[in-house]
Amino acid sequence: MALKLSDYKTEFHNDWCPGCGDFGIENAIQMALAEMQIPRHKAAIFSGIGCSGKTSHFINVYGIHTLHGRVLPFAQGAKIANPELTIVAAGGDGDGLGIGAGHFVAAGRRNVDMTYIIFDNGVYGLTKGQASPTLKLGEQTKSLPTPNTNYNVNPIGLAVASGFTFVARAYSYDVRQLKDLIVAAIKHDGLAFLDVLQPCPTYNDINTRDWYAGVESTDSSEKPRPRIYKLEETGFDPVVHYEDEAELDEKLSQALIKSLEWGNKIPTGVFYKNEIITPYRGRIKDKIPNYVENPPALQRISANGKPITDVSKILDSLEV
Amino acid sequence: METVDLSWLIGGPQGSGVESGANIFSRVCAAMGYQVFGKREFYSNIKGEHSYFVVRVSDKTIRSNVNDVSVMVSYDAETIFRHADEVTKGGAIIYDSDLSKTKTDEVPSLDNYFKSRLEKLLESKNKEFSISGVLEYVKEKGVKLYPVSFRGILSSVAEETNNPKLKGMIRMFNVLGVSLSLGFLGMPPESLLNSIESIFSKKPKIAEINKQAATYAYNYATAKFEKTKFSLNGGKKEPHTILVQGHQGTAIGKMVSGCRFQPYYPITPASDECVYLESNEILEIKEDRPGSTVVIQTEDEISALGMTIGGALTGTRSSTCTSGPGFSLMAETLGWAGINEVPIVITLYQRSGPSTGLPTRHGQDDLLFAINAGHGEFPRIVYASGDIEESFYDTANCFNYSDVYQVPVIHMLDKFIASSVITCKRFDPEKVTIDRGKLLDRIETEDYKRFEQTEDGISPRSKLGLEKGIFWNTGDERDEYGHISEDPVCRVQMMDKRLSRLEYILKNIPQEDQVVSYGVYEHCIISWGSTKGPILDAIEMLKKENLNVGFLQLKLLHPFPSELVKSLLKDAKTIIDVEANHTGQLGSLFKQNTGKDVDYYILKYTGRAMTSTEIYDSLKKILENKADKREVLTHGA
Ligand SMILES: Cc1ncc(C[n+]2csc(CCOP(=O)(O)OP(=O)(O)O)c2C)c(N)n1
Ligand code: SF4
Ligand SMILES: [Mg+2]
């Protein structure tokens, strides 16, 4: 029997502020899971701490709400132990690019086959609006007593530089594009990163829905000039098509250059995609040939309460 | 026949092969049927600083080092400066005669603290500050000297084998030192040559050169060295004896227990275990396809524990291995495992803190931290092994505890165990059981609740990927499904559910696995961890003088088996706490849980493990009413 969108929703009370961009992301994840018909027990949402961190409770698959900044280690551990699972990690921009930034970089280098979604709202929502790592230098959102004194992190650029093999950006009020990108990210064989621009109506009074829609910057006919545009509509080709240094350099550098665009023109869509790089699974398989068929979670370790691992050769070598 | 009990010391700069030299010596002794207890000491350094290895050899059971060195071999000056004074009367020093003129000032790695102590001693004996000064002094104490030119030996071998390159191969000094020792002690040469062959099995040419040099040195010592009372000519070989290193007990224990996932971040003295696991990552499984341990080097210890938990949530037996600094980083994540009732094992090889402390030295200063790490109140088990052999079986127990009680288990070991090499009975996997507790393989019901209230407080456990087993976890307080709840009544139920487990654990772990009693007398030691060996050896020394001291080895340290300990100690009058830290942490724990005071402390925090000699001396003082309340031990370079 086909699974319906509603099958992926829990009854757990959602306490996000009205109008919060997080709703769009939650819906898009559920829509993507339903579209892909992923059996509920085969999927797990891991989340960090923050408003965004509650996402795992709203989705009716395995849901692991971890610690502030630590969502990636937990999620990778589960995926490496059981590669059959579909794993989506989700968390705030503070969670992933502030306290968890070290894990972000390390995860990129590993390229474990899973999806990571950052809810990029420019603030620490759950602790009442302090500056997040993506807030620009000198900007002063509502609850900041003084302007932000830190330079911002470039999430797309950092992901590309760290080795993520699928790097994309979406906008939480464009749920259709967001859902499509989540599907593409889950299907991607490797670590996929999705930077989701997520207005926080409560604390971020700069990057608001109207700001993204360009309401204050009208053209000559008084029509708003939307800031957000889609890369695929410009003929941008993010895919590394073949194994070649020049091809790789070109695709990496165009992604980096695009990642710097901000202000009046904000690109969304896929910046970079490389399926030539072996996912982590393949690197383990090089050492442990039957890893994929017999990963840690599927191994039998005992029979009738007795161990079945035979260490006699090791013990023989220690005998004197 | 007189019993054999000798201590052999080899020293040299780090990177010069002290360890492989000691391994050859230990292997040969073990193959001859002797009991071996070896310990390595080294600096936090890769090349150049002083390291040494003491191997105690006996034909009776030994579990510790002693203060006195019987035979020392050195091919550098620093070893003589630092250790000559430890050689006992009638003992021997085999040394490189080319070094005789070396002055203390000429050895830059001799730190000022040690140098000034040594020079003060030499000054008081009217000796010059040089190798010959030191040697003159020890000779007067009755130590026999065996000078031999190591370069001279190389030259002779070069000539004999027509291979002039050999002359400059000072890298072989360690093999020369071992070979001279074997010749001197009258040990058979065959096992020496076999050992060399197996060490260089991939480099036959190098093996050949080493064998030539070894044979020459061996014959040289046999012919030229005057014999002493020290000789090793064959012990009683027990069948199925293994020679095993510290980290191998827990590593092999993990393989047998079915640990299949071990993320870790490198740190001394814990990484050896992980590297060993990874070197043996593909496992033979009885009547099945091969299994494997997936070992992952992570970006830090927070990630290591996070990944371990992620693995455990899939039903995989998962663990990590670390030392104090790494464990500190894990504190918050440990609490997450606690509130979510995730079974994981943290193998904690302690070293001396605080902070980076003495990074390569021994200490037992993390007991209270292991018990209290992480904010908030949650159940955990802290369990300590006393030696390498125990650590194998205890590892299996720790995995069972974590699965059965659904708690994180912290398995305490330390640097002393990690860098020991001992002979013991071959580990017996048949004695191991695997109990996964309430882990589910299948779920039939429709309304699964991960944290369902049950009579014993422990709920049936699903795992990621299991049909009908969907659950939620959160570091927040939660309801039976695992969803966040801040309801006060739910809070109380969940706190009670989790913490009632501590009582349950005390009731269900067999008492003999909680506390091991080696007899209780009027004077009784309480201790934990690797002090076990030196304590047992010290007690045995006292027994020979008809003096009895009891000993309780506490293995389960949290939850604390208060009633059991109290009842075991009911006839003891004087309680002596022995541990390798400054504050007597077990003493505090004991007082907190039993209301009783410790009468004496025997403590050591030099970063060097206790010897049985030291403990014996302190116990003697206590028995004679001459001891201070705090006996602080200091032996060892
Ligand atoms: C170790 C730790 N430090 C601090 C906090 C407090 N804290 C909770 S949420 C949060 C920031 C959340 O911001 P972000 O990750 O951007 O998520 P958002 O709420 O914006 O979705 C902080 C600092 C915590 N939970 N844990
Ligand atoms: S504070 Fe901002 S991010 Fe958090 S729920 Fe409210 S609107 Fe959303
Ligand atoms: Mg945020």
Image (tube, coloured by chain):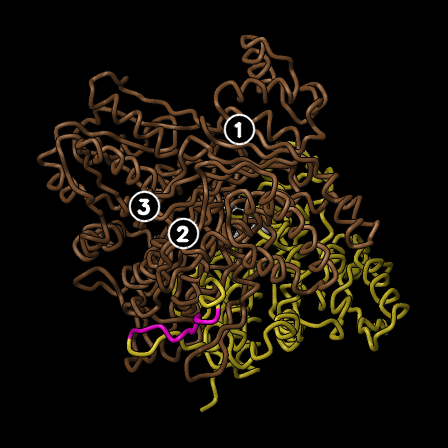
Chain colours: A yellow, B brown
Mark 3 surroundings within 10 Å by alpha-carbon count, few (fewer than 14), some (14 through 19), many (20 or more): few
Asked whether, in this view, residue B465 is left or right of residue B11, the answer is: left
Determine which residue is flagged by label 1. B144
Which element is circle 2 on?
Answer: loop
Q: Name the residue type under label 2.
A: Tyr
The spot of residue B476 in percent (x, y) is: 39, 52
Determine which residue is flagged by label 3. B1
Q: Do the dots labelled 2 and 1 sit on one chain?
A: yes
Which element is circle 3 on?
Answer: loop
Which element is circle 1 on?
Answer: strand
Q: Nearer the viewer, residue B594 or B210?
A: B210
The spot of residue B534 in percent (x, y) is: 34, 38
For disc 3, does the CB lie below 8 Å from ligand 1? no
The spot of residue A43 in percent (x, y) is: 49, 74
Q: Residue visible at 51% across and 28% down?
A: B637
Relative to B567, is A255 above or below? Answer: below
The answer to whether residue B99 of the structure is visible from this angle is yes
Inter-mark Cα distance, 2 to 1: 24 Å
Relative to B162, is A276 above or below? Answer: below
Determine which residue is flagged by label 2. B34
- First-in-chain label (2 vs 3): 3
For disc 2, does the CB lie below 8 Å from ligand 1? no
- First-in-chain label (3 vs 1): 3
- First-in-chain label (2 vs 1): 2
- Tag shown at residue B341: none
Mark 1 surroundings within 10 Å by alpha-carbon count, few (fewer than 14), some (14 through 19), many (20 or more): many
